[in-house]
Image (cartoon, helix red, strand yellow):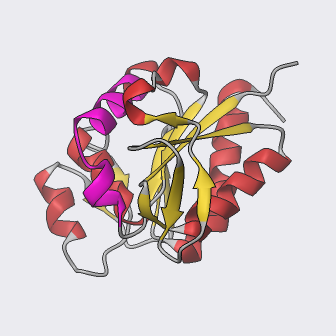
């Protein structure tokens, strides 16, 4: 039997390794295949200098090939992932009503893509700009570690990575009856 595929999208440079590694392990341990996408092919480099293999570039992604799509944060996420290709993927995912989400700074990409409009969400707010950004896109900011609303999960950062992964698993299992 083929394992259900989940897409994690990381910046080619500067993704957050804990936000990537902990949820990935949780999903793989539960029988999911985690596919890693990025803005460039080859190995992606995390903010601490570690690397992970990129399976597919975001320009090649079709949301319909995955059971869920999740953006990983880190200092490189806004520079490398905040753009038309990411928005396209998120809009496809929203049309399919599939599980999706983001952690840390990457939650801002969901807001800018319009998929958080009229939803509650959290995210990294170390620059005290998140509430203003969310207000611009009609998103209700909640200063919580993890927020799950309908089929969307948002989380604040590395401290919430494990819970983010667990909530992704719950959402996927509830969505398809896996587990």
State the image quarter where residue 142 is shown: bottom left
- For the N terminus, the quadrant is top right
Can residue 82 be found in the magenta stretch? yes
Secondary structure mostly taken by the magenta-highlighted segment of the chain: helix
* Pick the front one: 22 or 39: 39
**Which of the image's four quarters has the C terminus?**
top right
Residue closer to the observer: 68 or 56? 56
- Image: magenta residue range: 76-93
Q: Residue furthest front?
A: 42
At x 38%, y 20%, the residue is 95
Residue 140 pos. (x, y %): 27, 57
136 inside magenta stretch: no
> Where does residue 15 sit, x and y in percent of width and height?
46, 63
Who's the residue at 59% across and 62% down the image?
Answer: 51
Name the foreground residue: 47 vs 179. 47
- Residue positioned most to the right: 1
Q: Residue at image x 43%, y 25%?
A: 60
Q: In the visual, does 82 lie left or right of 39?
A: left
- Image quadrant assignment for residue 73: bottom left
The number of numbered badges drawn on the structure is 0
* Residue 20 x %, y %: 59, 59
- Residue 152: tell me if it is visible: no
Q: Tell me residue 38's x, y (percent).
A: 45, 44
Residue closest to the eye, 113 or 17: 17
Q: Is residue 52 visible?
A: yes
Q: Residue at x 79, y 30 (%)?
A: 178
Q: In the orientation shown, which residue stands out farthest toward the left?
A: 136
């Amino acid at each position: 039997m083929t394992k259900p595929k989940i897409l994690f999208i990381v910046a080619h440079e500067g993704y957050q390794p804990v936000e990537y590694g902990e949820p990935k392990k949780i999903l793989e341990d539960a029988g999911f295949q985690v596919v890693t996408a990025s803005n460039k092919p080859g190995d992606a480099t995390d903010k601490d200098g570690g690397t992970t293999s990129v399976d597919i570039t975001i320009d090649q992604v079709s949301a319909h090939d995955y059971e869920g799509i999740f953006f990983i944060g880190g200092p490189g996420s806004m520079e490398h992932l905040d753009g038309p290709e990411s928005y396209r993927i998120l809009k496809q995912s929203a049309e399919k009503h599939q599980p999706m989400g983001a952690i840390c700074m990457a939650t801002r990409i969901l807001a800018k893509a319009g998929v958080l409009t009229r939803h509650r969400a959290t995210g990294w707010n170390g620059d005290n700009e998140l509430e203003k950004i969310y207000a611009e896109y009609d998103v209700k900011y909640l200063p919580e570690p993890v927020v799950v609303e309908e089929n969307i999960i948002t989380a604040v950062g590395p401290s919430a990575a494990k819970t983010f992964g667990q909530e992704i698993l719950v959402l996927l299992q509830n969505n398809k009856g896996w587990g």
